[in-house]
């Protein structure tokens, strides 16, 4: 018997520095209602959905960026989204900047929560693969300062059961790394949710702009196929205060095929009836882990970060 889950990727158009959280939450609620009206039970929102992509900006005092962080989830400004999701009975993934106090120390993470249809937080993920740099590079048109404003996530790659399915979460740059998919797939993942904010320009090396979208989809399609899993990916899109984001939100089947994709750079909801059994044949044949994986030869993957690196930097 096949098991279907109608899931949606809810893409956000630009969120500018001057936009307040209440207005952004209002936009998320409208898309949540649209997805519910189409029969969706799960909605995936983007990375850092509540604010502009602030790591593009340098502040001499890093604490100036704290205004973009959430100290609780839900908080007063995000509670309406949780309440509406509960009223509608719709689950959702939400990416945000998390300010957390742990053992008396303040920490900053690029995080996402999975919220069940009852409005309760089912799970939390903190971004592991932080891109960019921490130093000030004033010559760049814009910067990518995630290594300055965030710490590496400390929760690993957990999975959760929702609607009787095993689900995983990751954030943006995590989607480019095969280890992300493989670790969660070894835990039985059937569907991965990912939010991202990806510039339409490579600020480190000149390359054709079309490669940004090509690589975006390539990595997720490969991850879906090589692990027999669905991927629901939601982006920020369009120009935030003049800085372009690629968009391209999509839903990818375990076969590696894109079955739904956003066509604009605005707020847009795309959805698909995901057959959660579709990946089974892939896991039984080409990517039958138990039959074909040779872990005795993979040790170097966890012993070395790069071709010449002995330890993480």
Image (spheres, rainbow, N blue to C red):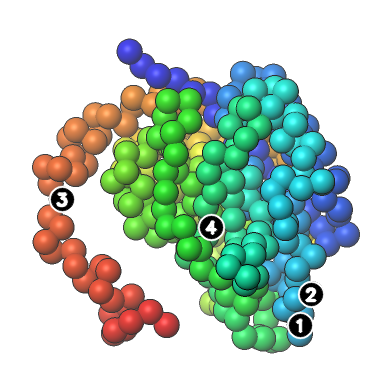
Sequence-earlier tag: 3 or 1: 1
Which residue appears at 44% of the width and 39% of the height? 160
Q: Is residue 311 left or right of residue 98?
A: left
Q: Nearer the viewer, mark 3 or mark 2?
A: 2
Q: Which residue is mark 3?
A: 293
Q: Residue beneath label 4, please? A: 126
Q: Is residue 71 above or below residue 232?
A: below
| Dot 4 alpha-carbon crowd within 10 angstroms: few under 14, some 14 to 19, many 20 or more | many
Which mark sits nearer the N-terminus, 2 or 4? 2
Q: What is the C-alpha distance between the residues marked 1 and 4? A: 23 Å
List the residue tagged with mark 2.
64
- The label nearer to you, 4 versus 3, is 4
Q: Which residue is mark 1?
A: 61
Location of the C terminus by quadrant is bottom left
> How far across and how far down the image is residue 305, in percent?
33, 75
Mark earlier in primary sequence (1, 4): 1
């Amino acid at each position: 018997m096949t098991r279907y889950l109608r899931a949606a990727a809810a893409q956000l158009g630009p969120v500018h520095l001057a936009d307040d959280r209440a207005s952004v939450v209002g936009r998320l609620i409208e898309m949540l209602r649209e997805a519910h009206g189409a029969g969706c039970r799960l909605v995936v929102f983007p990375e850092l959905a509540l604010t502009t992509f602030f790591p593009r900006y340098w502040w001499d005092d890093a604490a100036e960026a704290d205004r973009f962080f959430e100290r609780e989830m839900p908080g007063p400004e995000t509670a309406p989204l949780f309440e509406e999701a509960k009223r509608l009975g719709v689950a959702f993934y939400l990416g945000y900047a998390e300010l957390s106090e742990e053992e008396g120390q303040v920490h900053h993470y690029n995080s996402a929560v999975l919220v069940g249809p009852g409005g309760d937080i089912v799970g939390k993920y903190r971004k592991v693969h932080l891109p960019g740099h921490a130093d000030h590079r004033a010559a760049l048109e814009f910067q990518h300062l995630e290594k300055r404003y965030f710490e590496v996530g400390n929760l690993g790659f957990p999975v959760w059961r929702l609607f009787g399915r095993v689900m995983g979460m990751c954030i943006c740059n995590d989607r480019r790394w095969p280890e992300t998919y493989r670790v969660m797939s070894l835990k039985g993942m059937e569907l991965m949710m990912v939010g991202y904010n990806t510039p339409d320009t490579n600020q480190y090396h000149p390359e054709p702009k079309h490669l940004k979208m090509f690589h975006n989809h390539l990595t997720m399609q490969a991850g879906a196929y090589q692990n027999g899993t669905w991927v629901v990916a939601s982006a920020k899109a369009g120009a935030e205060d003049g800085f372009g984001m690629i968009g391209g939100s999509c839903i990818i089947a375990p076969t590696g095929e894109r079955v739904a994709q956003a066509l604009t750079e605005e707020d847009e909801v795309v959805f698909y009836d995901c057959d959660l059994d579709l990946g089974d044949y892939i896991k039984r044949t080409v990517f039958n882990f138990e039959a074909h994986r040779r872990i005795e030869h993979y040790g170097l993957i966890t012993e070395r970060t790069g071709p010449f690196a002995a330890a993480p930097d």
